[in-house]
Image: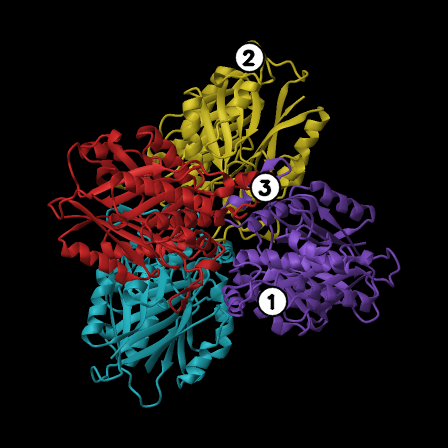
Chain colours: A cyan, B red, C yellow, D purple
Amino acid sequence: MAAVEILKFPISSPADTTPLDRLKEAGYEASQILAVVGKTEGNGCVNDFSRTLASAVWEPRIPQDAVTIFSGGTEGVLSPHVTFFVRAHQGVATGLITAIGRTRVLAPHEVGTSAHSLQVAHTVSQMMQQASVTPAQVHLVLVKCPLLTSAKIEAIRAESRTPVTTDTYESMAKSRYASAVGIALALEELSHDMLEEASASQNIWSAKASCSSGAELEDCHVLVLATDPAGAGQQQGHLHAVSRYMADAIDASAVRDLLAQVESANGKVVQVFAKAQADPRGHVRSWRHTMNTDSDIHSTRHARAAVGGLIAGLVSDCEIYVSGGAEGQGPSGGGSLCMVYKT
Amino acid sequence: MAAVEILKFPISSPADTTPLDRLKEAGYEASQILAVVGKTEGNGCVNDFSRTLASAVWEPRIPQDAVTIFSGGTEGVLSPHVTFFVRAHQGVATGLITAIGRTRVLAPHEVGTSAHSLQVAHTVSQMMQQASVTPAQVHLVLVKCPLLTSAKIEAIRAESRTPVTTDTYESMAKSRYASAVGIALALEELSHDMLEEASASQNIWSAKASCSSGAELEDCHVLVLATDPAGAGQQQGHLHAVSRYMADAIDASAVRDLLAQVESANGKVVQVFAKAQADPRGHVRSWRHTMNTDSDIHSTRHARAAVGGLIAGLVSDCEIYVSGGAEGQGPSGGGSLCMVYKT
Amino acid sequence: MAAVEILKFPISSPADTTPLDRLKEAGYEASQILAVVGKTEGNGCVNDFSRTLASAVWEPRIPQDAVTIFSGGTEGVLSPHVTFFVRAHQGVATGLITAIGRTRVLAPHEVGTSAHSLQVAHTVSQMMQQASVTPAQVHLVLVKCPLLTSAKIEAIRAESRTPVTTDTYESMAKSRYASAVGIALALEELSHDMLEEASASQNIWSAKASCSSGAELEDCHVLVLATDPAGAGQQQGHLHAVSRYMADAIDASAVRDLLAQVESANGKVVQVFAKAQADPRGHVRSWRHTMNTDSDIHSTRHARAAVGGLIAGLVSDCEIYVSGGAEGQGPSGGGSLCMVYKT
Amino acid sequence: MAAVEILKFPISSPADTTPLDRLKEAGYEASQILAVVGKTEGNGCVNDFSRTLASAVWEPRIPQDAVTIFSGGTEGVLSPHVTFFVRAHQGVATGLITAIGRTRVLAPHEVGTSAHSLQVAHTVSQMMQQASVTPAQVHLVLVKCPLLTSAKIEAIRAESRTPVTTDTYESMAKSRYASAVGIALALEELSHDMLEEASASQNIWSAKASCSSGAELEDCHVLVLATDPAGAGQQQGHLHAVSRYMADAIDASAVRDLLAQVESANGKVVQVFAKAQADPRGHVRSWRHTMNTDSDIHSTRHARAAVGGLIAGLVSDCEIYVSGGAEGQGPSGGGSLCMVYKT
């Protein structure tokens, strides 16, 4: 774990690495980068090559163990950008710390299963232990996890195993859910003896989980954001984070609640991390929605656009991280929400 | 003009006319319907047959001169529904009045031009005059106008005339703009000697205009909503309306402003009518958006999803009328906004 | 069963019923219509209201027991049209006969299951028996079957039953497969004791099956096209049909084979009925295709466009019936193919 | 110019450069690569990052002056692949020669104009002159040209200039057309004094032109494929090329005509280069098509799928280069067609 600074910059395309120049202007070196968490302008689904492109241009430019999480989909008012998690200068405490890590490579047949959850739980727990942070001090766990491509599904079958699904798009959801269950385990929101039931039920969740799946990786990349256990409260210029869940896609009061906390601390929002999802039951509260029956636009795209519109309006910022597919990351139809702010 | 009641009901598909039963339960006959204004679940673009379907099932069931405006596109959290404008019972004043009308049929080569604007202006002016309402008393003018299909474009060329555009999708925007200019003329927001300039510049707007275009009509259908000039102020159970513009797609303060007016009058929101648009300059405030460069989803779909998410969250209602394509209906990138409420 | 004439006409939109006028010009009354089989220009998927619209405008204009099968999706060069199956004039033999029928209403939980297959098999068998045709004399069985909407899935769950799938789009495939299995049973291509295995394996098929699913019906509508058992061979002006399977989406030789049969009989193609499908294994022969990993366009749309392009080019006709989703209607990745021709 | 070998290999994603290994197995070094012409699996439209990704991974691996043309869009049965144009081993004649070149950088306001055409014409002419080939010896000219992004359109306006269009998608068409006009000039199919008229009319074409536009470049990349003027006829193992136009999207006879020429020479098809387009008049021959009114799928995607299906079926190969947007590259609604074969 390291004291962390969080900065964000716009990108003109998924291949744009000029934020490195701006980072430098802000006094940080690329070697200090712990993670690049970006929103890129693809469809955020199976054939989203904007994520792959961003990974391809960023990875040679940052430390080898840095985590890259590119979430595709800047629907509606969402604006393409990258958020840097940067190791603070030697001896500087910022109020927040960040740890990064990776699980072992998951075999294709493990993706989306309880084996996948266990690997995530194991990695997150280890990271927390090393940093001496308690579950309550953790505000956000970002995970990027693999999906099943057609090739992987064939490979699983060739081994006479059964893939968790044969639909590549659906595998993204299964993988996100398995990662979220792993986070809930590590944060002691779920006990290990409930794991199999949680895997089967698909209805366990953690409001601190934010998971994305992509075709470009085989292991899970993990980032933990937590309050510095050695921290000294609300010092001038310090970073803080608050998190909670949105109950549904129009839960303005959840956003207002966190904004009120920021305001009462005289803080300024640095970044928002939200997960969004089309309610699988086909309704937002009592109102029928059509996100799940639109065969032209995937429901994740609809959900990002709507939730992005709401949060961007309330926060007055379009460079926010709103990621689709909130399985296990908030109640069904809602999603996790984390605000990082500076006092 | 007639004193008007405004009621809204969900629909289970574009072909669902069961709201008629619910209207009856509320004490009104189909013969009292002045207008059916609906959101249907198609793509809201050229090949949106959900609107045509709704027209086909509704028109035989309502008075022949009633106006039907079906706006396609319930992206994100928007929920398919119909809003009835119903003639109030004999002798009952409701606080608001509604007039309906139609322009003459527009020749294909007139669609989207100043000739189109003049027809709309003429019809709206006549309706206002007959009802003795001033521009200030008008809160909303809804217009449904034709678009150019491939067949119409061919027909124009066969006459050796030049269509306003040869792109069927773009013709929807041109038609909406021409209708909005007509509304601005009638509301004296634009003088007649500025008409040609306004047509050419594409940058005149009225915050009380709400225009949709569809393949299923040849004339313009017009609805004017105004304060009853004979009205007696804020009586119990009376309807009121307030309107203004949203400056951009994340203008939460515009929505909050109208909500504050409703609240200060101890009112309850009955319906919201909003127009939404992807800023043609490619930015929302300083943030780059990608709605205009997404070749998979038309920008109107993005804009409805985002603005719908914002307003639905603030108003806590998904059955709101958020319609795409705000050319001339608010500043560029923003849109018109009208709230009807009951005290 | 009745001697049948087959005529086809273009439509200018899904709401266009002017083909009735052209039918009249050709000497037939609407009362003689046995079936209207059309291609409409929607997406052919869950939210395709072009089919619903066509049903809404056609059904009041044709006999109540006539079958309407509107297959959405005219991707690529495919041209919107309707094919009429018309009862021939009294005493006239045409070489082909057609029977139409319906299964009982399927409960939502039956859709896509072996219970569904049994109902289709029962209806087809009865129709064949009544017309005294053998399986070899049958060339084509068209079935339109229900899909699972979000509402139906909820209804199934409310009964504590398990839907065959919870994905509305996937339910279309399951329903088509169940219908095809029913056809294979009736044509004695599958024995009843293999039914459960066939349902589970999803790999049984009939080259004479052509099934479409839609949200607008609860039962299955069935049309059987067969050689007139009382027929007198290749008389001048008689109709004939030949059918076989396409092994994959680029099986030009299958099309050429049927065309050669037509040509050797000095015939002229009247209509082609084909099913198309993206190979679920992700390859066409040895070549990787991307239809199953394209999150912007459903694979059925890709498949119709490609197979439609091939057949339209070979037959020199764009008004052909190419329908997506060939589950059980030809080998995996291929589809059924039937040519009706006149000598 | 150089004697050229042409080889093609499948790719598993736009980032897959393993064809380099297979090229090596075939006896060629990366340093011999003159051009990589690929089909990648994006949408082929404005926000197709699969092309950018392919450029990003290929360019560091091939000679700096090599041409890369990645055409997005593998709709239907089309299979992602790359075709290498490789400099033949020293002293080896192959029957065909290839020259590569680039125009100067085009200013944004030049894109799609006659100034753009002139630059292409100039570059192609120079390349032909240096190689001493006549227009009749040229079989194919591939050009990759820039498009107008939102940023470029803003830049043009900032200079008080008028962009050729303000629609980013339409700018792709304008750019392709301007490139094709340049090719027609160089091949003496168009005289220089007709240039302005050709630019305005948008109806000049060359059957040897194949142009793609992309966001990732500022100049035009050009490849000329021609018969070796020093060649010695149909030697064993030699390469040949034939080209002609397809009159429309279902012109099977054009494909059969070239195939017959290949067959009569006892040749084997190495690669097919075709351009496809939705007829802008809305019809394929007499049949209405819906490619131009589909607001969910761009017409170029439809056209590639349909024409790809036809050619792949006739040639029995899915790794063919079918590129969308045939403005100026064949008659309206048709496209250019070139077959390279080996004897």
Q: Quadrant of the C terminus of chain A?
A: bottom left
Kindly identify which residue carries mark 3.
B157
Quarter holding residue A240: bottom left
Kindly identify which residue carries mark 1.
D17
Which labelled disc corresponds to residue D259?
none
Of residues A228 and C14, which is closer to you in this image? C14
Q: Are marks 3 and 1 in contact (CB under 8 Å)?
A: no
Of all chains, the one bearing label 3 is B
Tell me the SS state at disc 1: loop
Residue D300 pos. (x, y %): 57, 51
Of residues C226 and B106, which is closer to you in this image? B106
Q: Is residue B123 visible?
A: yes
Tell me the SS state at disc 2: loop
Kindly identify which residue carries mark 2.
C89
Please give the name of the residue rendered at 19% of the width and 58% of the height, measured from the top-left corner: B260
Quarter holding residue C336: top right
Please give the name of the residue rendered at 70% of the width and 31% of the height, measured from the top-left corner: C260
Residue B139 pos. (x, y %): 27, 49
User: Mark 3 and mark 1: span between their CA atoms?
Assistant: 50 Å
Of residues C172 and D97, which is closer to you in this image? D97
Tell me the SS state at disc 3: helix
User: Viewer-nearest of labels 3 and 1?
Assistant: 3
User: Mark 2 and mark 1: span between their CA atoms?
Assistant: 66 Å
Of all chains, the one bearing label 2 is C
Above or below: residue C65 compared with residue C55: above
Task: Please rate how many residues cluster around mark 3, counting C-alpha atoms within 10 Å: few if below 14, some from 14 to 19, many from 20.
Answer: some
Of all chains, the one bearing label 1 is D
- Label 2 sits on what residue type? His
User: Viewer-nearest of labels 2 and 1?
Assistant: 2
Please give the name of the residue rendered at 31% of the width and 67% of the height, measured from the top-left corner: A316
- Label 3 sits on what residue type? Arg
